[in-house]
Image: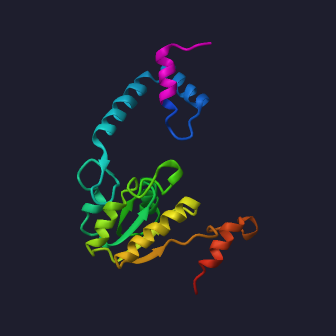
Amino acid sequence: MAFSPALTQLIDALRVLPGVGAKSAQRMAFHLLQRERQGGRHLATTLEHAIATVRHCSECRMFTEGERCEICANERRDPALVCVVESPADVMAIEQNTDYRGRYFVLMGKLSPLDGVGPEELGLGILRERLAAGTVEELILAMGATVEGEATAQYVGDLARQNGARISRIAHGVPVGGELEYVDAGTLSQAFSGRRPV
């Protein structure tokens, strides 16, 4: 059975969301049209407003509506300490779960030549300028432990070294409350190589 053109367009539009396949998009479209038309209108206007007004911070590339985000504009944050992360979600996780008081640089991805993502797509020119200004004393690499994350960390680390900044990396390994017998080999290897004295 063929859907109306407008319904087909709605289903296709919903598929741009991560993790949403054809069936999920169809379910969402049916729900919005069947039970949540007012919610759908609100979603549409809110999404349109966000796309028109939200941009990248000129210093860290986090999402903001102004020139600088709240973190970069906060004078109590330490500008000499910069944590490099892959996404805005990583910033939120660090902010909600740690007492980190430095600033950030958000890559909005990771190096992936096969996908056409190189240093310029990650805004590394902006980071290079921050490092060259000499205000960054320590760069904390907080990328995922994937192949692309490791390559990105290596590239950013080399960039920091060229500009005289100290480099540190967040620890990877056994999660709190984890049982060793259930930890995969890669994680266990990382945990041993990243061990520290107590």
Name of the residue lying farthest toward the right: 181
Quarter of the N terminus within the rendering? top right
Quarter of the C terminus within the rendering? bottom right
| Number of numbered discs overlaid on the protein picture | 0
In the image, what residue occupies the spot 71% across and 64% down? 184
Question: What percent of the width, then of the height, locates residue 105?
Answer: 37, 62
Q: Quadrant of residue 174?
A: bottom right
Question: What percent of the width, then of the height, locates residue 72?
Answer: 28, 62
Q: Determine whether, in the image, residue 75 is placed left or right of residue 99.
A: left
* Depicted 173 relative to depicted 65: above or below: below
In the image, what residue occupies the spot 72% across and 70% down? 180
Main SS of the magenta part reads helix
* Depicted 104 relative to depicted 158: above or below: above
Question: What percent of the width, then of the height, locates residue 86?
Answer: 46, 58
For the residue pair 170 and 70, the one nearer the viewer reads as 170
Question: What percent of the width, then of the height, locates residue 167?
Answer: 43, 76
Q: Which residues are magenta?
A: 1-13
Q: Determine whether, in the image, residue 183 is placed left or right of residue 122.
A: right
Residue 96 on the magenta segment: no
Q: Is residue 178 visible?
A: no
Residue 11 on the magenta segment: yes
